[in-house]
Amino acid sequence: MKKKILSLLISSTLTLSLLPNVAYATDSKIAISDSKEQILQKFQGLSDNKLKYDIDSSEGKVFLSGKLSDEEITNNDDALNFIEKNKELFNLDNVQDNLKIEKSERDSLGFTHVKMNQYIDGIPVKDKSIILHYNKDGQATNVTGDVENKISSISKLGDKSITEKDAIKIAEKEFKYKELAYDPKVETVAFIKDGQAYKTYKVNIKFYEPEITNYDVYVEATSGTIINKEDKIRYDGAAKGTGIAVDGSTKPLNIYLSGSKYQLKDTTKASSGSQILTYTANNRETQPGTLITNNSSTFNTTSLKAAVSAHYFAGVVYDFYKNLFNRTSIDNSGMNLVSTVHYGSNYNNAFWDGSQMVYGDGDGSTFTYLSGDLDVVGHEMTHGVTERTANLTYQDQSGALNESISDILGVLIQTYDRYNVKNGGTWEFNSSDWVVGDDVYTPNKPGDALRSLANPTLYDQPDNMSDYVNTSSDNGGVHTNSGIPNKAAYLVAQSIGCEKTAKIYYRGLTEYMTSSTNFLGSRNALVQAATDLYGANSAEVSAINNAYAAVGIGSSTDTVKVTGVSLNRTSATLNVSGTVSLSTTITPADATNKSVTWSSSNPSVATVSNGLVTAKAAGKAVITAKTVDGGKTATCVVTVSGSQQSDSLNEGFDNLVGTSSSISSGIPTGWDISSGIGVYTTSSNSGKSAPALRLNSDGSTVVTPSFDLSGQGTLSFWLKGNSIYYSELLIEKFDGTNWTTIDDISDFPSYGDTLSYDLDKNTKQIRFTYYKYYGYVALDDITIK
């Protein structure tokens, strides 16, 4: 039978308890934590019913936009206190221990952005953080969060004590290299994998030969197991593509005279501490190589074309970010802009390696000199900006968004230069500009490009979520699915122009996106950025919503989402042919779509139609109401009595709460469950349903309450196990005086099975005892009738 699944980590959309929790804020004031529904109602009131939100509390994802506070926030303690008061939105406990402020920055509009990283057992969790934004008046205006609320402690894979030095050695053995670029850097982070959090050492390994490599290697701290590797190099999608040659046009260069030699070194940005330096690898796979010099100030030979383009375009990228956003170089701290050209032999790629740009010459057919296209240069350098701001994880939707942001800003950088915006030119929108790689890809094929933002389908990219490509290759299709947000950006620029588009996307990237932001999250971030810059009811906000709706992400109009559903009753007892009417309450009350669907877990026992339940036969059935919007559920357990039996038991352990080692609450009345028994919390690890009992320890027992059968009865239960050798499950019955054996099972079904036994009318109780040599067994759905 199917069961309702209850968990303390229930989805944000279910109605939460109205009983307040008391927590202590960082300033020692008592902060009362309201229920989620109370919090949203408060925010709606403060925002004059214009609150915008996207919440999935079960996954710890929250996006809120509006007026969120009536108390002034002036410092980091106030920011933490705000999250403490509203922690029910995240299903997050113990904010003081779980969150620590990483940075707090005030921007040019007077907004302060407070980023709080999540910790488990004092260890920072990879990619989990909350960002609180408040305006110059101290009012909270936006919260973006992605936290882990199902895991409260660190798990172990072994019993060793791996040190940082051990982790470095383990990581180094994963690669073959001549020498490392620098001593490996090590950080301790909590890495979440398969529903568990592990203490790991993140070891950064970088070297240049035999090929440039830069990886973060995650080594689990109690076993030395490598549980993940992340490539830090951001290659362009044209690794196997084609392009056109450097165009031969004359470019103004900022160079440096050293003795009698002119160097490709631009020191005009010295006020910010940044220099532009261009090197050659001399067709070897090394970097940075040799600083390019010339006998005269005219760099006009064929062998220098790639370097001229790289050098000039690096300056354009710098000026774009500095003039529009006051960003001093890629890291906003004046880092040098280093480029290496003539990398390798016929190398058909360009990439950002985490600290500099690298360009191949191409093979002359698929690509020409890859430094010859400004949107390619802007694309790759923008990977550096992304890495030092949102740091979008290079996988699946966040990875495709990473690629898309580079494409979008790459095109905007190229048009910024093309229309001479720096010197007062008009920044035009022209559909033909919205391509990537057209100046270097397939040089012998006019009019070709690597990607089109105006029409992604021209180059085998989807332009709508209906055609999203699910794949395990290319880090989840990051260079394929980027076409969807690319098309949205094109539509935005078409609507509001290039300059506003650039400002919105930069602010959305640097202030509101996080490492795990997906496509819908990017829309939320961009809407918030447009709201900051132009107002909540502006044409710019509408342009974002309309563009994203056009590619199948979100809606062009603001809809009120369903956040929860409840029933007028959660249990009912009926006789055969009896009926009961169930009704739903949808929250919030003004939700746009209040439609629900009804289902019964056991139609032979009870059926349901539009909330009317009809009893068919003795037994139990779970009636479920599920909202069409968001898939939120509420359940009612219906027990149907029949004349054939005087007493029965049916326990699916629906209310048990615990872990794989202990049960914390929910043991049904009358049942005797010993220590050494835990709870399976999800159907994926129990094999059938959840919760389910997991018998872990030798001698652990489960004893039913007393019952009285009027005649012969039947015992049935579901069983699964991986026990081997001499493990056994003893099943006994009690007649009021003695326990006698029903069965002694030593061969357990590895995929789960339901077993049944006849009982005589004198049976009063059933006992299950697990004698363990190795392994475990899972026990569920014990029925006696």
Image (spheres, rainbow, N blue to C red):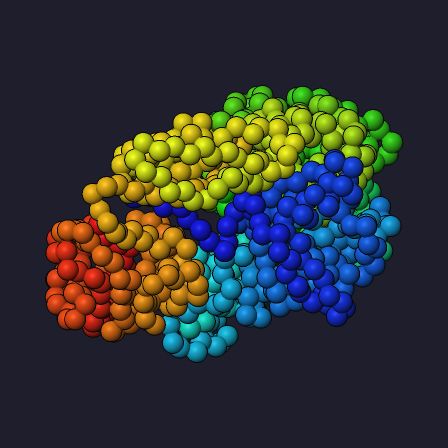
- What is the x, y in percent for residue 25? 72, 65
Q: Is residue 677 visible?
A: yes
Q: Is residue 461 visible?
A: no
Quadrant (top left, top right, bottom left, bottom right) of the N terminus: top left
- 472 horizontally vs 60: left or right: left
Count of labels in the image: 0
The part of the image, by quadrant, that contains residue 613 is top left
Residue situated in front as seen by the camera: 642 or 548? 642
Name the residue: 33% across, 52% down.
652
- What is the x, y in percent for residue 775? 25, 67
Vertical order, 369 against 352 (above or below): above
Name the residue: 25% across, 58% down.
707
Name the residue: 36% across, 65% down.
678
Vertical order, 204 against 375 (above or below): below
The part of the image, by quadrant, that contains residue 31 is bottom right
Residue situated in front as seen by the camera: 516 or 709? 709
- What is the x, y in percent for residue 333? 76, 57
- What is the x, y in percent for residue 693? 32, 60
Residue situated in front as seen by the camera: 470 or 75? 75
Vertical order, 600 against 71 (above or below): above
The part of the image, by quadrant, that contains residue 599 is top left
- 620 horizontally vs 378: left or right: left
Residue situated in front as seen by the camera: 694 or 286? 694
Name the residue: 38% across, 76% down.
159
